[in-house]
Image (cartoon, rainbow, N blue to C red):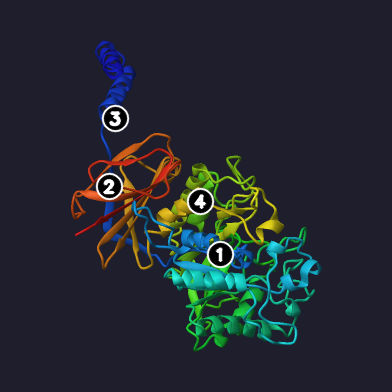
Amino acid sequence: MKRTFSFIILLGALILSKNASCLELASSNLNFLVDSNKKAIIKINLDDEKQTIENFGASDCWTTKFIGNWADAKKKNLIADYLFSTDTLSNGQPKGIGLSLWRFNIGSGSFEQGKASGIGDEYRREECFLDAIGNYDWTKQKGQQWFLDAAKKRGLNNFLAFSISPPVQFTIDGKAHGINANLNLKKGKENAYADFMVNVVKHFNEVGYHMPYLSPFNEPQWNWGEKKTTQEGTAATNKEIADFIKILGPKLNNTNVKIALGEAAQWNFLSNSYDNGRGNQIKAFFSPQSKNYIGDVPNLDNLISAHSYFTTCPDTALIKYREDVMAAKEKFAPNLRLWQTEFGILGNICGVYNGGPRNTSIDYGLYVAKVIHHDLSITNVSAWQWWLAVSPYNYSDALIYINDLNGGNDLGATKKDGIVSDSKQLWCLGNYARFVRPGMVRVNASLSSINSLEEAANTQMITAYKDKTSKQLVIVIINMDNSTKRFAMDQSDLTLAGNKVLAYTTDKTKNLSKSVMDKSDIAIPGRSVVTLIAKYK
């Protein structure tokens, strides 16, 4: 009745108006009513191929060193299932998000130092496999090694080893954190540090863990420990990085291990200058004209990575940071692959999201999905990795959380046992990680109702991926609006096998909940992420 009444008013305005502008206004409003029942169209171009997906991952820092040693196997296996499982429950819902890469932190010895490390929180200290007299103890980092094994038992055998500080016996100040803009490594210890990392990855490969990537630097733009010491870490200039990579690369001969370079603290450090010669890293490392060029170093993979922190708002900046990185890549190294290797919800994000206190709601899950979408669709990343897989803190930067048995955040208590809980950050990442598998190729996808990147970022976003062997098509749609949006598949250039598609929905009440939709009537609930799966011919 309300719709009919509006139609009569507009029709009257159209008939009675003698003013051209009034006529145009009435006409446009009439067209809106006529179109309001039409479904927007999902358009997929399978021939317009983008990047090949390599992995979705997360890191074992820092809680796993304790959780892996919990006596309660059921609880720690629940965490492993959430992260690594590709099994499904009886109702068709995935048991876990099926990560395809696990990041293993190579510790630097601050844990053995205890309070003398200068790192007050023992959760943020790590053991070291190498002692001060040069002996290796492969029983160290036992809790982290439990998760390596748990991942492998669930079918994930693809690991990246990353170091964020040299062992304390090699550092200038005897600590696992620097205090200025330079690499905290004693002169003359470059070969020893390189040998240490090579020996670690060799060991794990020899005992049956596929560890093909080594990342030797992490967020070198930050002066770790300059103001407050919170964790292991060291800064490094581009020159220091380049000089060290020239030493490390040849040592990896005959190992099948590649150096995964980068881990820049923010996207813009790849494309813009930054303090003390630590920016413009695409040009610095991969332009043959650069004095720090290392593109020809043996065993350096043809990729560079960055972290998505502090580059996500407002929407115009979210888009521009990533477009600038792509422009730099196209200018200096067009064939370079890009990875996003660390993200979590940190600090105040444009007054909308905040790291603390802990928030595991769908609002935060949608924000995570939005960042993933833009990294995949603008920066064309072939890998996307999370920071803390598990956290005991009252903070929002993890996928899985643990509380003490009283429901609080007693860090001493959670070393031995705790309450395990999931989050919408976990399951929204799962809308990608569980279904967009290594080897799939992203293809062009669009919605007829969206006309710009800025509009999409605040309404509906879409990406699509194909498996050339199985002919499987995976589509991920994010709906930021409160209301359900309905779509139909455009099959003018795409032929699907059958009229139905599988849908996996994460929203306020669902976690990858399975359903079946008709390709002519695809309903994406308000405030949700939905993964659609179909076969194409």
Residue designated by label 3: 36
Residue at x 22%, y 49% (from the top left corner) = 500
Of residues 60 and 438, which is closer to you in this image?
Answer: 60
Find the distance from the CA under tag 4 to the CA under tag 1. Answer: 15 Å
Q: Residue at x 67, y 61 (%)?
A: 415
Label 2: which secondary element: strand
Dot 1 alpha-carbon crowd within 10 angstroms: few under 14, some 14 to 19, many 20 or more: many
Displayed quadrant of residue 119: bottom right
Instruction: Choose the circle earlier in sequence order: 3 or 2.
Output: 3
Of label 1 and label 2, which has the lower sequence position? 1
Q: Residues within 10 Å of mark 3 (few under 14, many from 20)?
A: few
Residue 59 circle label = 1
**How many neighbours does mark 2 have within 10 angstroms: few (below 14), some (14-19), or many (20 or more)?**
few
Q: Return the mark for residue 516.
A: 2
Q: Position of residue 511 (x, y in %)?
A: 43, 48
Above/below status of 235 relative to 192: above
